[in-house]
Image: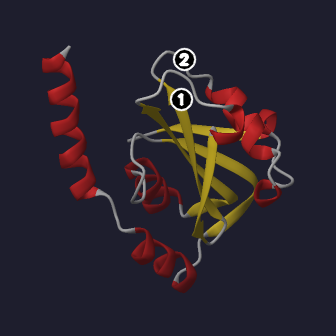
Amino acid sequence: MLTWRTGWQLLEQERSKLRQPEDAFIEWVINTPPIRLPGAAAIFTAATTGIPLCLTHHLRHNRVLHERVLFIASIIVDEPRVEASERVKLVPVGAGITRVLFHFGFMETPDVMEGLRLACRKPELAGIDPDNITYYSGA
């Protein structure tokens, strides 16, 4: 397990060097606006900072972006369980993009869809239906 964990951490360090900084990405989206699609997209990512590589790749090739974009990351904490009220943290990125951080205890089985339902009840994500989101998996 330690070998796997160390390898994953090294891989994540290298990926983080490739990710575009959030400020530069938002500036680019504002200055060269892509076509905005109605609805919301959720991008699963291991990162809690930077722009997921699959989104920059998607934009480079398709030049479209959903009106609302959620970067979803799960964080396992050093506590056995996390209360539902502490499960979700929303971080506005800009240009209709929000980072959604789910916190799970090390004894819990992460339920990302339940976390997403909790997140969509928050006023910042009003109007987003978790059952009508386009999902992307990326790094």
- Of the residues shown, which amino acid type is indicated by label 2? Glu
- Locate residue 132: give its quadrant: top right
The residue positioned 54% from the left and 17% from the top of the image is: 108
Above-or-below relation of 24 to 54: below
Neighbour tally class for label 2: few under 14, some 14-19, many 20 plus, Cα within 10 Å: few
Residue 17 image offset from top left, x and y in percent? 22, 57
- Mark 1, residue position: 104
Point out which mark residue 108 bears: 2
**Disc 1/disc 2 C-alpha distance (Å):** 6 Å
- Of the residues shown, which amino acid type is indicated by label 1? Phe
Q: Secondary structure at mark 1?
A: strand
Q: Nearer the viewer, residue 31 or 69?
A: 69
Residue 116 image offset from top left, x and y in percent? 70, 37
- Locate residue 72: give its quadrant: top right
Q: Nearer the viewer, residue 100 or 38?
A: 100
Q: Secondary structure at mark 2?
A: loop
